[in-house]
Amino acid sequence: MSEPPELSAMREVVALWYVDQSTCADIVYAACDLLAADYDGPSLRMLAAVSIDDAYAEVPPLLEAALGDVGLPYLPRDSAAAELAALRAMVARALSGEITPRELTAWVHGQFGHTRLEVAELLAALDDDYDIGSVDVAEIDAEVLAEARTIADLPSSPT
């Protein structure tokens, strides 16, 4: 059974916030969408009520409890688990066609390099393959999507 879109959107925006790829304002908007979709909880309501002008300061202390209200995990921002969550969010975008395989590898390479997140190493290396141009782009795309499917199927905690 797939996750409701509002819950998936909150999961994705928070995952990308962990690595500074979305904003606290994005989290407030996602909280509002959850309330509109009949999710509820005292901390979620407080999060959705945050002024966008104050989001940077007010969202972080509310986030863990608000995620708990809707059954989503909270991860420490600088953890390998948070980085894996962000990677999985971007992988989901690539698998849905929202971004291209090339865009995924460029993001991974820029975000994690070759050594910061072991599970992302092959994608970073495939970004190099795009740059070198010695392999057909369609072949690289296929390999990127195959690796993306592998990452999507990983457990939530990093290896």
Image (cartoon, rainbow, N blue to C red):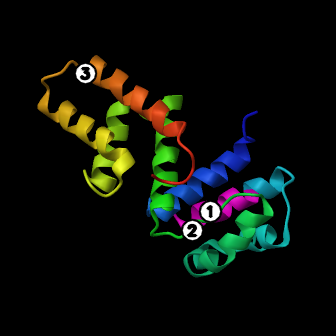
- Amino acid type shown at disc 2: Cys
Viewer-nearest of labels 2 and 3?
Answer: 3
Near mark 3 (Cα within 10 A), the count class, few <14, some 14-19 or many ≥20, is some
Which stretch is magenta? 22-32
In contact (CB < 8 Å): disc 1 and disc 3: no
- Amino acid type shown at disc 3: Val
In contact (CB < 8 Å): disc 2 and disc 1: yes
Q: Residue at x 66, y 46 (%)?
A: 8
The picture places residue 28, in percent across and down from the top left corner, at 66, 65
The picture places residue 31, in percent across and down from the top left corner, at 72, 61
Which numbered marker is on residue 109? Answer: none
Choose top left, top right, bottom left or bottom right for residue 24: bottom right
Which numbered marker is on residue 137? Answer: 3
Give the distance between the C-alpha atoms of the residues marked 2 and 3, in whole angstroms: 36 Å
**Vertical relation: 49 (above or below) 141:** below
- Circle 2 residue: 24
